[in-house]
Amino acid sequence: MRVGWIFKTESIVIPAVLDLLGGSAWVRGWLPLMNRIGHAFPPLLAASTLRRMPQKSRSLLRTTLAMACGIGGLGLVYSLGVRSPGYWAPLTFLVIYSLFFAAVGINTNALGVVTAKLVPVDRRGRLLMFANTIGAALAIAAVVLLMPLWVGDGRADFFSVFSFTAVCFLGCAFLTLALREHADPPTPTKGPRFRDHLLLAYHTLRDDRQFRRLALVAVLFGTSLMVFPHYQALAAERLGMSLDFLLLWVVVQNIGTAVFSAAIGPLADRRGNRLALLAALLLSAAAPPAAALISHSPEWSNWLYHPLFLLVGITPVVIKVLQNFTLELSGPEDHPRYLATLSLCMSAPVFASPLLGRLIDLTGFDPAFFLVGGLIALGWILTFGLREPRHAAIRQTVLPAADETV
């Protein structure tokens, strides 16, 4: 999954492709929205179904196959769009992109539940470290060897890029068949309706004070996803950097993910997820304002802008720490619901991402980047009010099962 994902990095590759299809900052602003809608509502809708499945890894198989089809569709749209330009190309790209991330959202939720079943609580940080360090090493090797064949020196063959990603996802899907997961007792009760899912999410937040505070931190951190598509645009418009730098940025970002995973994962296992979250959020808050400041110094930008993507690389680490924190705050039967509610909260601010893109069109990059950095910093401050589940006696509010509530 990591090898395939590096070829479609959200902060670099996807917005560059959309720009080539005729997108503006306002159009790029829809990317985080489509991304987080997929992470918010489909997992919430699928939570009861996932809870009833005897083997949760089957959801991993199906959604990873759907992701392979979706990324292949994006490659096809790009291939046709560069030959026949028009408004249809970015619009179709966004539609398929949203369907792709609907599959990603359910896949992420299923992976969290499977992780909770198969990995002890004090080894999940180690899993994060190994998955991202080994995965990033392989991904960096793949992108260094293959990306120059398709992008750079005037070439922009993103059809081949996305096709390779689709092949990687297919391989990942079939690898899930090797997981040894015991079957849960079947629960054939029919799941709730959509409005009932939203009501369950509301009850989860209302009745669990510790999770409600963690969800607020997730909301503020979710603003970081709003600026993801604009990092490469900032470099292109203000610093004149071309697509030739895509490979370097992708590599640096994944090195950042690997390095921070190697540090944050063991820290979470030894000292708990609260301290890990404090460290990761502080670094994440520094990225947007640093990008804006560096872009005003052309003489230093060639040295400083590229390492900036190390900080961007911490984003998936923060998301994973938030998910692991959530798993410790809830019982096994509530894991799908809690994870889906967390995704919904993290996605909430991204509904304003088209407005942020419009703000960039009107006022430039600086106000948007400093605003987002300040909001993430506020979330970092609120993290001090969280209590570590492993080191403190937290009263767990036992919520009714989803179907019983309905």
Image: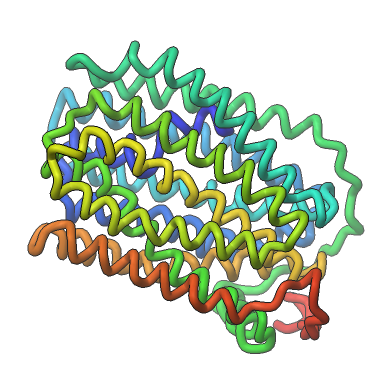
Give 191 or 133, whichever is nearer the viewer: 133
> Is residue 182 visible to the viewer in this orientation of the structure?
yes
**Residue in the image at 67% along x and 41% along y:** 129
Give the colour scheme of this rendering.
rainbow
The image position of residue 11, as x and y in percent, is 35, 44
Query: How many labels were placed on the picture?
Result: 0
> Is residue 48 visible to the viewer in this orientation of the structure?
no
Quarter of the C terminus within the rendering? bottom right
386 sits left or right of 333 in the view: left
238 sits left or right of 126 in the view: left
Quarter-wise, where is residue 271 in the image? bottom right
**Residue in the image at 14% along x and 45% along y:** 297
The image position of residue 230, as x and y in percent, is 25, 49
Give 406 or 206, whichever is nearer the viewer: 206
In the displayed structure, would residue 9 be above or below residue 400?
above
**Residue in the image at 84% along x and 47% along y:** 118
The image position of residue 225, as x and y in percent, is 39, 57
Quarter-wise, where is residue 227 in the image? bottom left
Give 228 or 160, whichever is nearer the viewer: 228
In the displayed structure, would residue 189 be above or below residue 14?
below
In the displayed structure, would residue 108 be above or below residue 279?
above
The image position of residue 405, as x and y in percent, is 73, 83
Quarter-wise, where is residue 3 in the image? top right
